[in-house]
Image: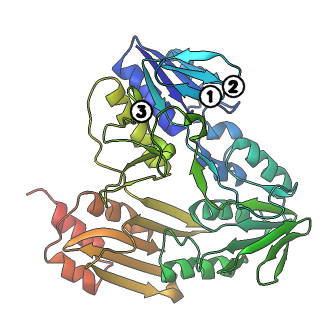
Amino acid sequence: MQFLIIGAGPAGVNAAESLRKLDPDAAIRIVGDEPEPPYSRMAIPYLLMDRIAEHGTHLREAAGHFDRLAIDVTHARVARVAGDAHEVVLDDGSTHAYDRLLIATGSSPALPPLPGIDGPNVATCWTLADARVIQERAQPGSRVALIGAGFIGSIILEALGLRGVKLSVIEQGERMVPRMMGPQAGGLLQRWCEHKGVDVYTGVAVERIDDDGVQLADGTQIGADLVISATGVRPNVGFLDGSGVEIGQGVLIDRQFRTTVADIYAAGDVAQGLDFCTGEYAVHAIQPTAADHGHLAAANMSGKETLYEGSMNMNVLDTLGLLSCSFGSWMGVDGGDQAELYAPDDWRYLSLQFDGDRIVGANAVGLFQHVGILRGLIQRRTSLGKWKDRLMNDPTRLMEAYVATTQVV
């Protein structure tokens, strides 16, 4: 059996390792289009904080790891997929045949259509090559403008803040992390960043980027030596044109990670799979989902049919020392109830969203002890019974509710 994996991120690497355990004799090849060993993009902020060296971003640090598993790692770019012929064609015209193919190509930064976005003072923060540019140019005291305060932007914000730069953050939405948190939680994060010396501009668009920095639509000029664009990502699917693989938000997959073309599977940030909370199909571009996808896609590729229960929308941020998180349907559901705690003077916020007597979503700021409990209650679809009313009165009693409703009798 020949297994071919396009993409050397967490989904691809976990799939390859799982396939090796499931099929000791198979030929397994990973094709990645970056020159470095397979690495984690989520480790790049720690590199920028000087907490790890570059090799610390590698998904598998031990020398010879892939060789010992007889997994071939090829550095090349795939130009197209010929599903009928069961082969992929590389940029140089060479081909690789497969029996089963996994698309795990992840995503790339979505650059906004702004004048000056391709200027020499503009960078993204997505690859190790990007990180090297930022390390060189974001020195203590330098002026850095960060466009985008969503999840990715806020992760970068943490790293930049710890580099000692003079940081300005621009978010077109009305609050920070608008797709992760409601107004009070997002507003609390903004106040915290400003408290820490970061200039934050929300509810205003960027008009253009020039040599002096960023011009906002309201006329504000933000001086910057370096501008970093973090305005979202889009799945890497261009090479699938003409392949017959159906694309929605990402590559459409069923609960066994199969695409619309026989023997082609997809996993990770590129895949539009089942959402645990809504029952719909969505792209959840987070590393835990990518890792789970990789393991389960491998099981199905090897013939061990395994139905996926769905991924949960979840994000955890450490913003200059203030922890925040978002789980599931954090914005609530039709007909549902909400319990809320708002203590801005103590930098704390908690909202619980209910569907009947089950928690289906949550936002939390400054309450790190509840992160694991929230995830567990949502994923277990725990029926809280009388504990729902108690949480409605005091949402901080989550630990008591968890113990009372999940203990085995």
In this view of the protein, which residue sits in the foreground, 56 or 33?
A: 33
For badge 2, the amino acid type reads Asp
Disc marking residue 216? none
Residue that badge 2 annotates: 91
Q: Residues within 10 Å of mark 3 (few under 14, many from 20)?
A: many
Q: Is residue 227 left or right of residue 20?
A: right
The residue located at (36%, 60%) in the rendering is: 372
Q: Position of residue 121 (x, y in %)?
A: 86, 58
Q: Quadrant of the N terminus?
A: top left
Q: Are marks 2 and 1 in contact (CB under 8 Å)?
A: yes
Q: Position of residue 386 (x, y in %)?
A: 14, 77
The residue located at (51%, 38%) in the rendering is: 10
Residue 135 sits above or below residue 377 on the image: above
> CA gap, disc 2 to disc 1?
6 Å
Q: Quadrant of the C terminus?
A: bottom left
Q: Residues within 10 Å of mark 2 (few under 14, many from 20)?
A: few
Residue that badge 3 annotates: 265
The residue located at (56%, 82%) in the rendering is: 187
For badge 1, the amino acid type reads Val
In this view of the protein, which residue sits in the foreground, 227 or 78?
A: 78
Q: Position of residue 134 (x, y in %)?
A: 79, 53
- As helix, strand or loop, the secondary structure at mark 2 comes to loop
> CA gap, disc 3 to disc 1?
16 Å
- As helix, strand or loop, the secondary structure at mark 1 comes to strand
